[in-house]
Image: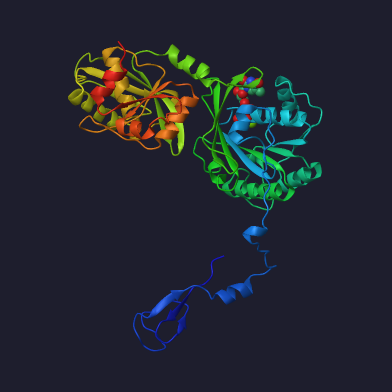
Amino acid sequence: MAFKSRFVCQECGHQSFRWLGRCPGCGAWNTLVEEGEHIEARIARSQGESVQIHTLAEVTWKDTAGLPTGISELDRVLGGGIVPASLVLLGGDPGIGKSTLLLQAAGKVSRSGQRVLYASGEESLPQIKKRAARLKIDTPDLYLVFETEISRLVRSIVDCAPFLVVIDSIQTVFDGELGSAPGSVAQVRECTAQLMRLAKTKGMSIFIVGHVTKEGFLAGPRLLEHIVDTVLYLEGERHQSFRILRAIKNRFGSTNEIGVFEMTGDGLGEVHNPSALFLRQHMSGALPGSVVVPTLEGTRPLLVEIQALVSPTAFGTPRRMTAGVDYNRMVLITAVLEKRAGCVLSSFDAYVNAVGGVRIVEPAADLGIALALASSLRDRPVDPALVVAGEIGLTGEIRPVTGVRKRVSEAAQLGFLRCLLPSADAARLGDDGAGLEIIGADTLPEAIEKVLQE
Ligand code: TYD
Ligand code: MG
């Protein structure tokens, strides 16, 4: 609640509730200074009991090892397993497999003898039963409830007293006391806060599903990131089978881990060696014009394949076209390629595309774009086990990028073998290349020389 501010004269102490140029008390000019409400008054106003305060020495702490779900790709991302008294948010596009993953995890945890309650507000219980059958989950004591009103939901959770609760999804849950519609910012935030209190006071572990909406994250997971303990995102192309699970916040573990799954006919299968999945797909397309770039989306690494096509211009001005890559950046890179690296593109149309509908804005993708163009122009493929990152300057030099370690470890986790970096970054990385062979380059011509295979 906002409190009323006061203005106090620095000369005579006269008080006023609004700012005045001249103090009515002593007549001095410009002496009134704004002051917060008196702290005594605020203490007097505050109601309720005083809160217990502890010294650091008094506080005890147990290493709360998480309970493994048995899905190791999930456990690794969680930081070992399901931590009691925690609230975990699983975000992702609709249809990506969030319910599938959590029902599978619920089944495993229930099978291990812990009580699990799966609360759905999206699918009816028979629908869940049907999915469970498809996922071959047959634990008799997996508890289900269809409820969307938060106080009734909390009541049923308390009555059931499970170890693990799944709320699918937070957008369907609502508090009848708030006027707004389910899924609105106020509802989502309030209901999540209530679930957080439940998790902390009852020692339960609660997973909530949050759909990421196309319009952005307004009433979605982004809103909740600061409330919950752990934020996981399940990502992937709907029309491709692989899914990547990553933690973007984790109070109980690292956020560098990723879990890789493959959507199959009977649920999400774990992919322990993602290179088999990812590189197979990429290698089958290891044609001239394709380069993989480890980009950082905020703090999150993401491997993106950049494709370029260079073809002779039939007549007139050469065409330039981009999708998922900044147009002006591409034009600039084309000019640098032409002037500094001897790749004459002025009589060629050039198209650049970031595969999978992603949008790359960071300059670290420059080198990837340049090499994809050069590769297509020369009709020579780039090593499909290579990733490249580097910003290109107008003189053709390759400039350092941020977050090199994250990029490199993401590439290593996904099975890539080599990484081309600006020399400065390569030197800084030293032997710490996460198992990748690190190649450094200072200039664009040098990079082209190093990666375009005969
Ligand atoms: P779902 O878990 O319902 O997605 P979300 O909860 O994130 O909205 O997954 C739905 C998609 O997954 C749907 O297109 C069907 C597919 N699917 C499979 O391919 N195999 C399966 O075993 C299951 C259960 C779903
Ligand atoms: Mg779902």
Establish if 168 lies above or below 280. below
Q: Which of the 4 image quarters holds residue 326?
A: top left
Judge whether residue 39 can be spotted in this image.
Answer: yes
In the rendered image, the quadrant that contains the C terminus is top left
Of the pair 67 and 93, the residue shown nearer to us: 67
Establish if 261 lies above or below 191. above
Image colouring: rainbow
Residue sitting at 45 percent across and 39 percent down? 299
Q: Quadrant of ligand 2?
A: top right
Specify the farthest residue to the bottom.
26
Q: Which of the 4 image quarters holds residue 379?
A: top left
In the rendered image, the quadrant that contains the N terminus is bottom right
Count the labels in the image. 0
Judge whether residue 361 can be spotted in this image.
Answer: no
Residue sitting at 40 percent across and 34 percent down? 404
Establish if 290 lies above or below 188. above
Residue sitting at 47 percent across and 36 percent down? 300
Give residue 307's position: percent from left, percent from top: 36, 20
Give residue 26's position: percent from left, percent from top: 39, 89
**Taking 315 as reference, is 83 left or right?**
right
Establish if 41 lies above or below 279. below
**Taking 315 as reference, is 366 left or right?**
right
Give residue 429's position: percent from left, percent from top: 38, 33
Residue sitting at 54 percent across and 76 percent down? 38
Specify the farthest residue to the front.
431
